[in-house]
Image (spheres, rainbow, N blue to C red):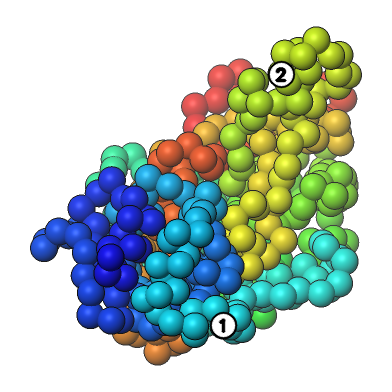
Amino acid sequence: MALAEVVADLLGSKVPLAVAAFDGSRAGPAQPVATVVLRSPDALARILTRPGELGLSRAYVAGDLDIEGDIYAVLDLDVAPSDLRIGPGRAIELLRQAGPSALRVLPPPPEEARLRGSRHSRGRDRRSISHHYDVSNDFYELVLGPSMTYSCAVFDQPDDSLEAAQTHKHELVCAKLGLEPGMRLLDVGCGWGSMAIHAAARHGTRVVGVTLSTEQHQRATKRVADHGLSDLVEIRFQDYRDVADGPFDAISSIGMFEHVGRRRMAEYFDRLLGLLRPGGRLLNHAIGRPGTPPATTAAGRARATGRQLSGAAGLRGPSRIKSPFMERYVFPDGELHEVGTVVSMMQNHGFEVRHVESLREHYPLTLRRWVANLEANWDDAQSEVGPGRARVWRLYMAASALGFERHRLEIHQVLAVRPDGGRSTMALRNRF
C-alpha cells in the first residue's frame, strides 16, 4: 500500500479528501475539497513519536504537513485527532514507506509555549498573555479587520459585515451596562481599545482600559489619540488586580475571563465587586464549556451504581482547555467554565445576576470571517509573524468555528449588579 493510501486510511475522512505524500504517491478523488500534504518524512516522525493531536499539530505548524483547500473539511474527520491511534500494522507500514528516519524525535516548533512558574501567578499570566497577543499588531489587523476587535461579534443577519457586527456587539454591551455621559467604565482586558473608543465616542463615557499586552497597550493608546478621545479614555499597561482608583459605574470584561483560571475566579469577582459603586453593573463576556451530560457526571455514575454522592459534582468538572494544541500553541493556561458555575460564583461573591445571553451561533460567523481574512492576506501574514504562527492561527480559528457549530464550545454574556440595599438600576423589562 502506498504511503498516501496508508495515511488516507488512517484519517478515515467522510468527505472528499485527498492525501499527497513526499514520495509522489496520492490517494483520494481527483477533485477533492481539500488535500492533506505530507511534505517530508518529518511529518511521519512527529505523528509516530507523538501520536494524536499534538503530533499532528506539530507537523502542521512546522510545515511538514500542509492543508490545501477547505481546512474545515479536513478538521471534520470521522475520528478526532485526540482519538487518533496508530496500531502496530499501520505503524509498520508507515515505517516501511518512510524509513528509520520516521522514528526520530524532533524538537517542537518554536511557536510552542513552555511557561514556567506557578499557574496564574502574575508573572506567568503576563507571559501567557504575551505569548498570544504580543505577536504583531499589523498581523492582528490583517485578521480582525479595521475594528481590531478580538471577540465574538453580534449579527443581526448572517450576511452582516464583520465591522457592522462588531459595532453591534459594542453597542449591546453599552446598553446592558446602561452607559451614560460622564459615567466611569473600567474595561478589563481592553485589547486594542475598540470597546473603550466606542463607549467614549457614542456615549460620552470616561473609560479606563487595562491590558497586560505591551503591543495592545501601544496600539490602543495610539488609536484613542487618533480618534481624538484622549481626554475621555486612558489605556494602561496594568493588571486588573492593581487597579485602585474605583469606584466605577460599570465594568466590561470581554474575552478576558478565559485567562483568569478556576483558582483565581473568587479573587477576580471579589476584586471587580470592590471596584464597582453600589448599583454598578458588570458585563462578563466569555467562552465556556458545555455542561457535563447527566449520564457522565460523577453524580450520574453514582446513581447508576447505587452509591450516594454529596454536592453538585456535575458542576465541578474540568475547566482547563483539554486540547494539547490549544494549550501549547494558542492559549497557554486558558480555562473554560460552565456558565452555571460562573453565575453561581458571581452570586456567591456579592453580585446579583440579572441577565444571561448565549451568543454561540454568532461566534462561528465571526471566526469564519477571521479565517477568510487570514487566508486572503496569507502572504502578508506569514511575512509579519512567520509561517508557523500564521498556521497556528489558521488552524485554531477554523477548529474553534467548528467547535461552536458542533456545540463543543459556548459563549455567554452575563450581566450582574452590585447590590445597593435591595434597590436596582435595572428597568422592569430590559430589551437589549
Asked if residue 258 is positioned above or below residue 330 in the image, the reply reads above
Residue wearing tag 1: 104
Callout count: 2
From the top left corner, tell me how far across and down residue 246 is, in percent. 84, 55
Task: Please tell me which residue is depicted at 35% across the width and 63% down the height of the picture.
Answer: 7
Task: Assess disc 1: are there few (<14), some (14-19) or many (≥20) residues with their C-alpha within 10 Å of its C-alpha.
Answer: some
Whichever of callouts 2 and 1 sits on the residue coming sooner in the sequence is 1
Q: Secondary structure at mark 2?
A: helix
From the top left corner, tell me how far across and down residue 125 is, in percent. 77, 68
Task: Please tell me which residue is depicted at 73% across the width and 42% down the height of the picture.
Answer: 318
Q: Is residue 203 at all visible to an observer of this figure?
A: yes
Asked if residue 406 is positioned above or below residue 381 in the image, the reply reads above
Q: Please tell me which residue lies in front, 40 or 266.
A: 40
Q: Are marks 2 and 1 in contact (CB under 8 Å)?
A: no
Task: Assess disc 2: are there few (<14), some (14-19) or many (≥20) residues with their C-alpha within 10 Å of its C-alpha.
Answer: some
From the top left corner, tell me how far across and down residue 216 is, in percent. 60, 75
Q: Quadrant of residue 415?
A: top right
Q: Is residue 128 left or right of residue 230?
A: right
Q: CA distance from mark 2 to mark 1?
A: 44 Å
- Mark 2 residue type: Gly
Task: Please tell me which residue is depicted at 61% across the width and 25% down the height of the picture.
Answer: 293
Task: Please tell me which residue is depicted at 31% across the width and 70% down the height of the picture.
Answer: 3
Q: Is residue 18 left or right of residue 59?
A: left
Asked if residue 414 is positioned above or below residue 21 in the image, the reply reads above
Q: Please tell me which residue lies in front, 181 or 91.
A: 91
Q: The N terminus is located in which quarter?
A: bottom left
The label shown at residue 161 is none
From the top left corner, tell me how far across and down residue 284 is, in percent. 66, 44
Q: Secondary structure at mark 1?
A: loop
List the single residue furthest toward the left: 30
Asked if residue 44 is positioned above or below residue 34 in the image, the reply reads below
Residue wearing tag 2: 300
